[in-house]
Image (tube, rainbow, N blue to C red):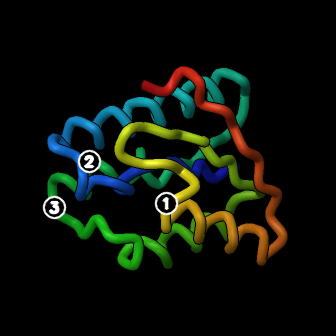
């Protein structure tokens, strides 16, 4: 299984319409996960798995809430793919969550692969 690290809430505090941007990020992540499924891979995306539940039950958007959940998922995956998403409000390299996911994966010896996202937004 492949853990998918993707941009989610980074930069939302500066965005005039955060819910629209969040949905675009989720939709793009879904598109990339679909592509990986069609390639015969087994991706796991915490964004896709938890986004709707987070909205419906107003779960925290902070990485401190999700960190242990995400690390546990990384423990169970063979590798991590990082979607290198950049938009006007956020950059994957500045995401606290993605930065931590990469560091944790490397710490426990998981392979980290970076995927270009030229077709994002």
| Contact? badges 1 and 2 (CB < 8 Å) | no
Which comes sooner in the sequence, label 1 or label 3?
Answer: 3
Examine the image and state in which quarter residue 83 appears: top right
Question: What x and y, as percent, mark residue 51?
Answer: 32, 50
Q: CA distance from mark 1 to mark 3?
A: 24 Å
The residue depicted at 36 percent of the width and 76 percent of the height is 65
- Give residue 57's mark: 3
33 vs 118, nearest the viewer:
118
The residue depicted at 56 percent of the width and 33 percent of the height is 33
Query: In which quadrant of the rendered image does the C terminus lie?
Result: top left
Q: Secondary structure at mark 1?
A: loop
Q: Nearer the viewer, mark 1 or mark 2?
A: 1
Question: What x and y, as percent, mark residue 56?
Answer: 15, 53
Q: Secondary structure at mark 3?
A: loop
78 left or right, relative to 54: right
Q: Which residue is mark 1?
A: 95
73 vs 117, nearest the viewer:
117
Q: CA distance from mark 3 to mark 2?
A: 8 Å
36 left or right, relative to 65: right
Q: CA distance from mark 1 to mark 2?
A: 21 Å
Which comes sooner in the sequence, label 3 or label 2?
Answer: 2
Query: Is residue 115 shown above or below 71?
Result: above
The residue depicted at 40 percent of the width and 78 percent of the height is 64
Q: Secondary structure at mark 2?
A: helix
Which comes sooner in the sequence, label 1 or label 2?
Answer: 2
- Give residue 52's mark: 2
The residue depicted at 69 percent of the width and 71 percent of the height is 103
Q: Nearer the viewer, mark 1 or mark 3?
A: 1
């Amino acid at each position: 299984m492949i853990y998918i690290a993707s941009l989610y809430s980074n930069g939302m505090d500066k965005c005039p319409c955060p819910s629209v941007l969040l949905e675009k990020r989720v939709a793009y992540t879904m598109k990339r996960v679909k592509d990986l499924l069609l390639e015969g891979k087994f991706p796991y995306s915490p964004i896709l798995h938890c986004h709707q539940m987070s909205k419906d039950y107003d779960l925290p958007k902070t990485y401190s809430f999700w960190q242990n959940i995400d690390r546990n998922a990384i423990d169970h995956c063979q590798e991590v793919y990082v979607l290198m998403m950049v938009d006007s409000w956020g950059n994957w390299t500045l995401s606290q969550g993605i930065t931590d996911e990469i560091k944790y994966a490397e710490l426990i010896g998981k392979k980290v692969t970076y995927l270009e996202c030229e077709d994002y937004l």
